[in-house]
Amino acid sequence: MIRGGSSGPPYPDPAWAYVPGRTSRHPDGTFEVLCDTARPDMTARELSQTDAWLAGLQYLDRGFFWEAHEVIEPVWMAIPDGAPERLVVQAVIQIANASLKQKMERPGAVLRLCAIAEALLADGQAGCLTMGVRMQDLQDLIVTQRETANRKTSEA
């Protein structure tokens, strides 16, 4: 679980997890209602309470990695450049991408995305809570993805 404190209301899971090359893509507009809750006129604090962010974190926790990226991206786009929250949201997106690449059995891509996510979080403090997410939880996800990818690389 990467959400600190209360996780908000549970959101219905997507009908399936989209994995490129394995499953069909969701129809256009499937996540529009969630995405539209993140607006550029909102503060980072307000964005951390949007359905887009909360559902995205839930999707990430439940293995819907492509879907998590899809609904979190509008949150990232709404946060001003240079804001520390923007880096955290971008790191979450990269972790979702790394998790998807893990499912696609692409360990090299997993390692590259983990390095990007780790660099985005480099200035954060492990005990810090940003956008309702504990930095240590994100760092733990990166370590887990990296270890799995390294194991798969050594087995090949």
Image: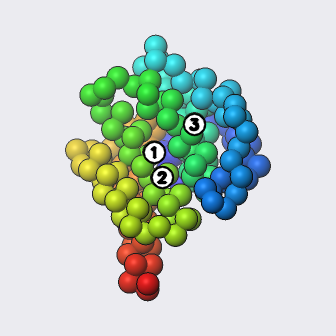
Q: Mark 3: which secondary structure?
A: helix
Disc 2 marks which residue? 97
Where is residue 20 drawn, in percent x and y?
61, 56
Q: CA distance from mark 1 to mark 2?
A: 6 Å
Where is residue 86 drawn, in percent x and y?
36, 33
Q: Quadrant of the rendered structure where residue 128 is?
A: top left
Task: Say which residue appears at 53% left-offset and 43% top-offset.
Answer: 69
Disc 1 marks which residue? 93
- Residue 82 or 131: which is nearer the viewer? 82
Q: Mark 1: which secondary structure?
A: helix
Residue 102 seen in the figure: yes
Where is residue 25 drawn, in percent x and y?
68, 47
Q: CA distance from mark 1 to mark 3?
A: 10 Å
Task: Say which residue appears at 30% left-offset and 47% top-offset.
Answer: 121
Mark 1 residue type: Ile
For the residues bearing labels 1 and 2, Cβ distance under 8 angstroms: yes
Q: Mark 2: which secondary structure?
A: helix
Residue 48 seen in the figure: no
Where is residue 142 drawn, in percent x and y?
39, 60
